[in-house]
Each structure stands twice: as C-alpha cells, then as structure tokens.
Image (tube, rainbow, N blue to C red):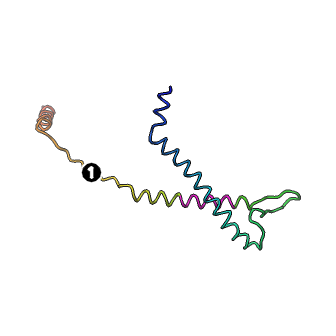
Amino acid sequence: MIQEFKDFIARGNVLDLAVAVVIGGAFTKIVTAVVEDLINPIISFATKGVPFAKLSWTPIKGVDFKYGDVLSVIITFIITAFVVFLIVKAANKLMPKPVEEETVEELDEQTELLKEIRDALKAR
C-alpha cells in the first residue's frame, strides 16, 4: 500500500495539480487584494463615500441584504476567471499543434500476394 501511495504521488499529474493549487491560492489573494484595495474604493467613491462592503438593502424591517460583499466576490471571480482564460489561451498558442500525418498504406510483397490469393479465392 505504501508503494502504491508513492507511485501515486510520483505521477506527474498529481504534482502538477499540487503546484496549480498552491499558485491558484496565491493568485486568488492577489486578485482579492486588487478588488478590495483598488476597485472597491473606486465604487465607494461612486456611491458617495459609502464603503462597498457596507452596501445593503433593507426591504423588510430588521432584515439587511448585504449585497456589497456579494458584488465584491463576484468581481473577484470575474477577474480571476478572465486571467485564467488569458493564461490558457497563451498556453494553447505555445503548445505545438498536432500534425496530421497522411496515412499511406505501404504494402510489402507478402501483403500484396495475400491480397491476390484472397481475391482469387473470392472469385471461385
């Protein structure tokens, strides 16, 4: 069981996934900081100084729908998804495109002879 576990961990895909998760976590922190420290203050300025996270709606007495935080998370998601899209697009350009090889039937003498024998047997 230990050997199977070592084999599983040593696979390239598992290591690639682990690296991707670590980098993804760090990247998410960067995007969150950009949204919270750059974008939210701009929106706060547009809402006449009301902090973005404090935006809420109270349609029912005593019940607040705090949509500011939700919008912040949505903006973070959109930026993250867009950057991931750009990375995948760049990676696809760098990867070599598969070359379509023409399938050429190379028949040696034995194969040709076997085909002639088959055709002769069918003719009988």
Is residue 78 covered in magenta? Answer: yes
State the extent of the magenta-drawn residues as a range: 72-83
Say above or below: 95 vs 120.
below
Direction right: furthest residue = 61
Using the image as rendered, state which of residue 94 and residue 18 is in the foreground: 18
Q: Position of residue 73 (x, y in %)?
A: 67, 58
Residue 106, horizontal then vertical, whole percent: 17, 43
Dot 1, crowdedness within 10 Å: few (<14), some or many (≥20)?
few
- The residue under label 1 is 101
Secondary structure under the numbered disc 1 in the rendered image: loop
Q: Position of residue 45 (x, y in %)?
A: 73, 73
Q: Is residue 92 left or right of residue 18?
A: left
Q: Is residue 93 above or below residue 104?
A: below
Residue 108 appears in which quarter of the rendering?
Answer: top left
- Residue occupying image coordinates x 49% and y 58%: 87
Residue at screen point 14% across, 31% down:
121
* Residue 56 x/y as whole percent: 79, 62
Residue at 48% x, 42% y is 15
Name the side, left or right, on which 51 lies relative to 24: right
Q: Is residue 49 left or right of residue 16?
A: right
